[in-house]
Image (spheres, rainbow, N blue to C red):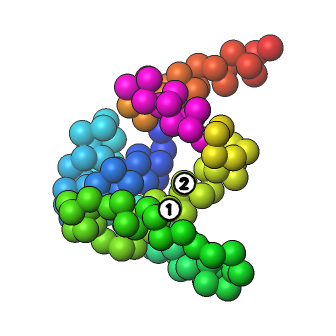
């Protein structure tokens, strides 16, 4: 089974811990098994953050020019502890969820995927199972 790429690990770590410092993110990436140099990981963290910020900017531009009203319900539901998250990190997560909705064909399918991830115990385990299923389907 191929190892996840450095950028995918960094994206997962940033999604889970968006307010962590770069040094904390480097430690977490290494904890997940990457042996890359600190400089390489740091450079990739900056690249992924820059990419996420561009996605957020694009999403904000699209949402402000859209005639469809944007629901404020999720923002109201944020807990007090979540207010410490950077706005850009929250919006980046919203962009990722929106992209996932499009990829899986709607909200109900996304909920089923989220439940499958939860049932597997972690994103990493879900991705391992996904690779196994992909290998089986490709072999067929």
Residue 31 sits in which quadrant?
A: top left
Query: Residue at 54% of width from left, 63% of height from top?
Result: 95
Query: Residue at 59% of width from left, 19% of height from top?
Result: 132
Task: Give the overall secondary structure of the magenta segment.
Answer: helix
Tell me the CA gap for discs 2 and 1.
5 Å
Decide whether residue 116 is among the magenta residues: yes
Decide whether residue 140 is among the magenta residues: no
Q: In this rendering, would 85 be left or right of 139?
A: left
Q: Secondary structure at mark 2?
A: helix
Residue 50: image x %, image y %? 45, 73
Q: In this rendering, would 30 be left or right of 15?
A: left
Q: Which mark is residue 97?
A: 2
Residue 84 sits in which quadrant?
A: bottom left
Query: Residue at 33% of width from left, 50% of height from top?
Result: 16
Q: Residues within 10 Å of mark 1 (few under 14, many from 20)?
A: some
Between 88 and 115, the residue placed more toward the observer is 115
- Work out whether 106 lies above or below 21: above
Magenta part of the chain: 110-121
Q: Which residue is mark 1?
A: 94
């Amino acid at each position: 089974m191929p190892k996840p790429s450095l950028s995918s690990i960094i994206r997962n770590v940033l999604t889970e811990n968006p307010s962590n410092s770069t040094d904390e993110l480097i430690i977490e990436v290494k904890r997940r098994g990457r042996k890359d140099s600190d400089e390489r990981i740091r450079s990739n963290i900056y690249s992924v953050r820059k990419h996420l910020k561009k996605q957020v900017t694009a999403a904000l531009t699209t949402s402000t020019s859209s005639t469809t009203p944007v629901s404020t319900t999720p923002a109201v539901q944020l807990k007090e502890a979540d207010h410490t998250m950077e706005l850009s990190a929250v919006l980046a997560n919203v962009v990722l969820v929106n992209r996932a909705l499009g990829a899986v064909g709607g909200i109900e399918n996304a909920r089923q995927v989220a439940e499958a991830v939860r049932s597997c115990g972690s994103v990493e385990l879900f991705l391992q199972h996904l690779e196994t299923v992909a290998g089986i389907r490709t072999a067929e």
